[in-house]
Amino acid sequence: MPVSAPAGSRRGWRLWRTTVFRLTLAYAAFFALAGMALLVVILWSATGFMTRQVDASIAAEMAEVMADAADPALHGDPYKTVIDSLARRSPAFQYLLQSADGKPLAGNMRALRPVPGIRLMLRDHRLGHENNPEPTVLHGQGRVLPDGRFLFVGLNVYSVAEMRQSLARAFLWCLGPILALGLVSGFLLSMSMARKVERISVASRAIMDGDLSQRIARGGGDDEFDHLADSLNTMLDRIATLMLNLSQVTNDIAHDLRTPLTRLRQKLELAERGDLTRDALREALAGAGGELDRILSTFSALLRIAQIEAGSRRAGFTALDLRPLLQTLHEAYAPVAEEGGQTMTFQPGPLPLPVQGDPELLTQLVANLIENAITHAGPGAALALDAGRTGERVYITVSDTGPGIPAGLRQKVLQRFFRLESSRTTPGNGLGLSLVAAIAGLHDAELTLDDNHPGLRCTLTFAAAVRSTL
C-alpha cells in the first residue's frame, strides 16, 4: 500500500500552492494595473498637449481674422473678403462666414448651427470639396458678429483622434506582454516568498511537534524574513531557557523540599505516639510547625521571585535617593555584624544617588546582599557598603573579606536553590541571591559578582541616574 504523506506536510503543501497562486495573481494584477495607469497617463498627457496646441492655434487664427477684418483699407464686406482670401491661402484651416439665417456667405465649409465658443464636431460627410475623402473631426471656435452673422474658424483634428486610437491599440497589444511579464515575475517572486514562508512554517511545525531545538534558518539576503527569523529564534531561545529553568526549578523544589517534608513527617509520626509526655508532644508539634514555616517561606520566596520577574511591581516605581535607604540599612545591620565578630562600614559618595525604582524591593535587595555577606563571610570578616556615581550611572557595592565564591560558580549562585557545599550546613533555601537577581533585572540594573581579594564583591549598577532635585 502506498504510504500517505503526513497531514502537516499535505497541509503545508496546499498552503504553499495557494500562496504561490494568490501572489502570482496579485503581482500580475499589479503589473497590469501599473501598465494601464502608465498608458492612460501617456494618452491623457499627449492628447491634452495636442488639444491645447490646437486651441491656441485656432484662437490665434481667429484673432488674426478679426484684426484683418478691422483694416479700414478693405472695401465692401471686410469679413467676406478676409475669409475668402484665407480659405484660398490656408488649406489647413476651415473657415465659415454665414448669415443670420444660416446661409453660407464665405469660406470652405458648409453651414453650421451657430454656437459660439469652442466646439468639437464629428462629421462623416466631406467638408467643402467633393474630392476630399478625409474623415472629419473638426475642432474650432465660433463667434457671433455684431451684425448677427456667424464666424467660425476650425481645424481638422482627425490626426489627434487617430493618435488616440493608435495609443489605445498599442495598449491592447502591450497588455498581453504586460500580463505575461506580471505572471512570470509574480510566479518567481511568489515562489521566493513562499519558500521563505514555508521555511518558517516547517520549523514551526517541528517545534509544535515537541522539538524545541529547531531554529529557523536565515535566507542570507538580510531582508525582512531574515529579521523575522532572528526575532523568532531569539524568542525560541528565551522559551527554551525558560523551559530549562522551569525543569530545573521543579527538580530543585522536589530535592530541597524532600528533606524538610521528611523531617515534618517524622515529627508528626512522633506526635502520634501515645506514650509522649505533654512537653514532648508540645516540642514535636513545635518542630513540625517550624518545618512548615520553612516550607512556606520557600514557597513565598518563589512566588515573590515570579511576581518580580513578571514586572508587575513596576507600577510602584518612583524617584528616590538611595543614600537615606543605605544609611538605614547600615544602622540596622552593623550591630548584627558586630555580634558575629565582624565589622561593617558605610562609605557613600558626596553626591545624591537618584534612581527610579520600588523602595521596598531595593531595600530587600541590599538587605539580602548584606545578610548573605554576614552569613557566609565568617567571624572576623570586614564588610563594606559603598555607593556612588560614575558619570550618569549609580552603583551600590557590598563586599566582604570572607572565603568568597569560585569564579566558575558566581553565575550559578544566582540560580534558584543553588548552594555551595560550604553553605549546606547554614540556614537558608538558596533563593536569596535569586531574589536579588530578579529585583536587579526589574530595575534594569546590572549585578556583578567579583573577587574582593579576598572575599566577594557584589556590585549593582543602574543604567542611568534619574535627573531630579534630590
Image (cartoon, rainbow, N blue to C red):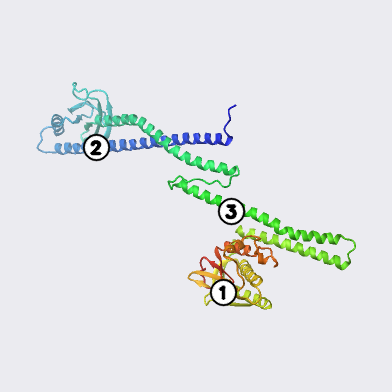
Between the residue at mark 2 and the residue at mark 1, the CA separation in whole angstroms equals 90 Å
Kindly give the residue lying farthest to the top in the view shown: 130
Residue carrying label 1: 386
Secondary structure of the residue carrying tag 2 is helix
The 10 Å Cα crowd at callout 1, few under 14, some 14 to 19, many 20 or more, is some
- The secondary structure type at the circle numbered 1 is strand
| The N terminus - image quarter | top right
Q: Nearer the viewer, residue 236 or 22?
A: 236
Whole-angstrom CA distance, mark 1 to mark 3, is 34 Å
- Please give the name of the residue rendered at 51% of the width and 72% of the height, measured from the top-left corner: 389
**Callout 2, which amino acid?**
Asp
Q: Is residue 90 above or below residue 355?
A: above
- Secondary structure of residue under mark 3: helix
Q: Which residue is mark 3?
A: 241
| Three-letter code for the amino acid on which mark 1 is drawn | Asp
The span from disc 2 to disc 3 (Cα, nearest Å) is 78 Å
Q: Amino acid at mark 3?
A: Thr
Eyeballing the image, is 130 above or below 238? above
Residue 116 at what x, y percent from top left?
Answer: 26, 34
Label 2 sits on residue:
55
